[in-house]
Amino acid sequence: MIAATTHTIAGRSRNPIRNRWAKIIASVVLITVVIFIPFGRRAFPIRNSYHIDSLSFWYYPWGISEVHKGIDIFTDSAASVYSPVSGIVWEQGYGTLGGNYIYILGPGLRTYYFAHLSAVYAHRYQWVSKNQIIGAVGNTGNAIGKPFHLHYSIHSPLPLLGHYNEREYKATEKLFYLDPLSDNTP
Ligand SMILES: [Zn+2]
């Protein structure tokens, strides 16, 4: 009798349909919370950078992604990376290009991407506050052997129509990216 009860409970917790609904409901709740975060001035993720190439945003040609969708902030190894906004860690992992990376979902459902980290101090679905330390600068992924830097990019789910310039390379795709250095518009 005890064995049967235990089996039922274990079976319930492993129910894939129930788990899927739990994930969907959790995602809807998190997205709803993020939608209502007010827009404000972003914080800068690095405190002491020694070089930022202001022309690196949308630089072409740039490897397999053709354009550089963010900026590279050169600084000391293991310098702290601060979250520019309050939001939720939407994804965190390791990729061959980005190395250790973090995506934060912030105001307006924009995603803030940080790559080449040496360490990550936040986990998936964790709430982070603006200026909270989320990781440390490194040279992981396709930055191995290169100077330590943070790759930082901001993606918007809605096109920023006022930014359209037909003479720019991939002008339509660019509408979905913000220049972290100059573009602070909500
Ligand atoms: Zn980069």
Image: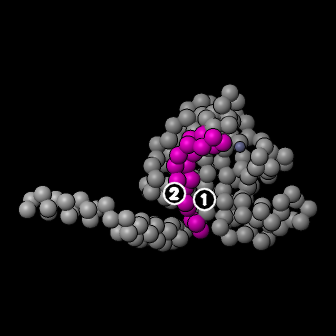
Cβ atoms at labels 1 and 2 below 8 Å apart = yes
Three-letter amino acid code at the position of disc 1: Thr
Say the numbered circle drawn on residue 111: 1
The percent coordinates of residue 2 (x first, y second) are 9, 59
Q: In this view, does 176 lie above or below 152?
A: below
Q: Is residue 116 above or below residue 168?
A: above
Q: Residue at x 66, y 56 (%)?
A: 154
The percent coordinates of residue 134 (x first, y second) are 50, 45
Indicate left or right for 135 with 149 as reference.
Answer: left
Q: Does the residue labelled 2 lie within 8 Å of ligand 1?
A: no
| Residue highlighted by disc 2 | 90
Residue furthest to the right: 167
For the N terminus, the quadrant is bottom left
Q: Which residue is drawn at 31% across and 60% down?
A: 14
Q: Evaluate whether residue 49 shows in this view.
A: no
| Residue closer to the observer: 98 or 160 | 98
Q: In this view, does 83 lie above or below 185?
A: above
The percent coordinates of residue 84 (x first, y second) are 58, 53
Chain part drawn in magenta: 91-109
Three-letter amino acid code at the position of disc 2: Trp
